[in-house]
Image (cartoon, rainbow, N blue to C red):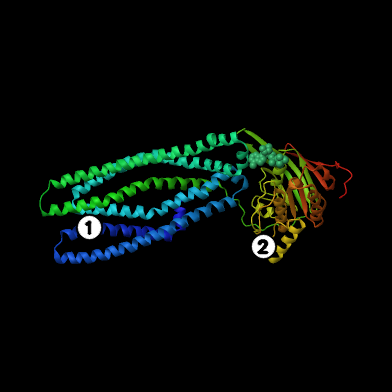
Amino acid sequence: MLVFLIKKTWQRFVATALSSIIFGIISVSLVALINEIINANGERQTEYFMVFAALALAGVVVQLISKLVAEQLSEHSQAELRKLVADKTIEAKISNIEAQGDAKIKSCLTEHSLKVAGFFMSMPGILTNAMIVLGAFVYMAWLDWVIFLFALLTLVLGSVSYSFANNIAFKKIANAAAMQDGLFHQFDAITDGIKELKLNRSKRTFFKQEVLHPAIDALRKERIEGVSILHMASSWGGFLIFTFIGGALFFLSQQTGEESQRIMSGFALLFLYMLTPLETLLANIPRAFAAQASANTIKTLSDELVNEDESRVPALASFERIQLQSLCHRYYHEQSDDIFSLQPIDIGFKKGELIYLVGGNGSGKTTFAKVLCGLYEADEGQIKVDNQAITCTDLDGYRQLFSTVFGDYYLFDRLLNVPCEQLEQKGNALIRKLNLHHKVSIEAGRFTTQRLSQGQRKRLALVVAYLEDRPFYLFDEWAADQDPVFKDVFYRELLPELRDKGKTVLVITHDDKYFALADRLLKMENGCLTEVTQSPVTPIPTLA
Ligand SMILES: Nc1ncnc2c1ncn2[C@@H]1O[C@H](COP(=O)(O)OP(=O)(O)OP(=O)(O)O)[C@@H](O)[C@H]1O
């Protein structure tokens, strides 16, 4: 995932890395220069001062550049990650998205991408300080190779203990990242379930104390444990540094002469200057690990979201007959280890038919509708449009035949059609026809409000579906939220109008009063679809 991001933002990445490294080199050169100035004589000192001034100025400029570019790098990488997750989700199979769950997807879009971006933000600090420490080591080797070897030994010891601690800490941090996805699910429950929580005090208390708080606390505990291990390792590193400094100073104090004085002051300066960069480096390690855990989570999600093979097939625009042959679809319920299955379905739909589909709750009506319109891929059997079999690569093109309003429809705040004045006029005329004009209209492609009642929102969803002007309309219990007068308008006027325009309309309904208005009546029972030949209601009641 980090490689993907680096590829996407490589110019900024290189600029950040280079400017941070150059700033590190300048910083450590300044320290070496200070030591040389202290120990140099008159003329040479002036020369050094000039170099010092030039380096200091360059340092300020380069540091500013590295910070500015790092900020851009961080924002760009976060934007790239969000686009990646969002696009992958939109392009994935719907069953695949449902299996992942929206909490995990939201968590990747927000917190995980923020953590990865945070790492890029801290990159200048990490690289600059790494360069300072590296430069300090080089200067150390130049001043006294024995102390340099001693420093190297300390570094190896520190690294070994650090990697041991990291292994334990990383598992905890990765575990915390997974727990966070579950927590997002509970955050959704706070807003989505607020009515239920407000109306029932004991439920509210139980939710807070037994569900939400334990989930928050479990995540806190895991994160604290993981990060504490890293901080302990960091303190151990600090201890090693001080041991090294003490040992080096003791070793130097045993030596005499003018040269040893220069070396001693050089080391004193180095140690002082190195401490903060070393500490910053160590402190940044937990953040880097959290970023890596988040990057892994995003990678796992994007790998699991299988892209639909759309292959940019042309959209189907019309049909004479859609034939389903031995079509099957199954849901496996992991928790209860049972399967819901649509029995092999053989049925055909002609252009310009009005079909009602009835059946009990959970009998499989919605599932059938989703397989019919290509949202779910059939596990067995096939769909034929005018005798042409639809393969999985044709599915996206096939779906373009349908316009739907399912029970869990989503109403976007705008039309999402290519902006066009005629379309807006047509939409506003439909809004008037559906008696919504006193509440809402379409302006510049957007609905003026979405603050509508359930029934009104559903009417607006119907407007959106009408504007798509597709050959096959599918309504899943659309009329359930409508008042009796509008129900009548829907069944007696709107549906027959659609049929008369040559549209095929499949209506999932429980409104038996209107069954006789359908051309065909289908019944779903336990996943088994049958055609009801005899019309159950006669005669057709007339509109009052
Ligand atoms: N996304 C899903 N994942 C797994 N199982 C599901 C899913 N959606 C529905 N089911 C299962 O499939 C069965 C049929 O559900 P479906 O929604 O098709 O019924 P329905 O006839 O439309 O019911 P209703 O009249 O209540 O809307 C149910 O037993 C349900 O548990």
x and y, in percent, of residue 323 in the image:
75, 48
Task: Kindly identify which residue carries mark 2.
Answer: 443
In the picture, measured across the screen, residue 73 lies left or right of residue 345, that is left
In this rendering, does residue 402 appear at all? no
User: Helix or strand or loop: what does disc 1 sit on?
Assistant: helix
x and y, in percent, of residue 165 in the image:
36, 39
Which amino acid type is marked by label 2?
Glu
Which amino acid type is marked by label 1?
Ala
Q: Quadrant of ligand 1?
A: top right
Q: Out of 305 and 85, give the one closest to the viewer.
A: 85
Mark 2 Cα shell of 10 Å, populated few (<14), some (14-19), many (≥20) = some
Give the numbered dot on residue 448.
Answer: none
x 34%, y 60%: residue: 63
Residue 108 position (above or below residue 313): above
Give the numbered dot on residue 32.
Answer: 1
x 30%, y 51%: residue: 277
Of tags 1 and 2, the one toward the viewer is 2
User: Helix or strand or loop: what does disc 2 sit on?
Assistant: strand
Q: Out of 523 and 304, give the one closest to the viewer.
A: 523
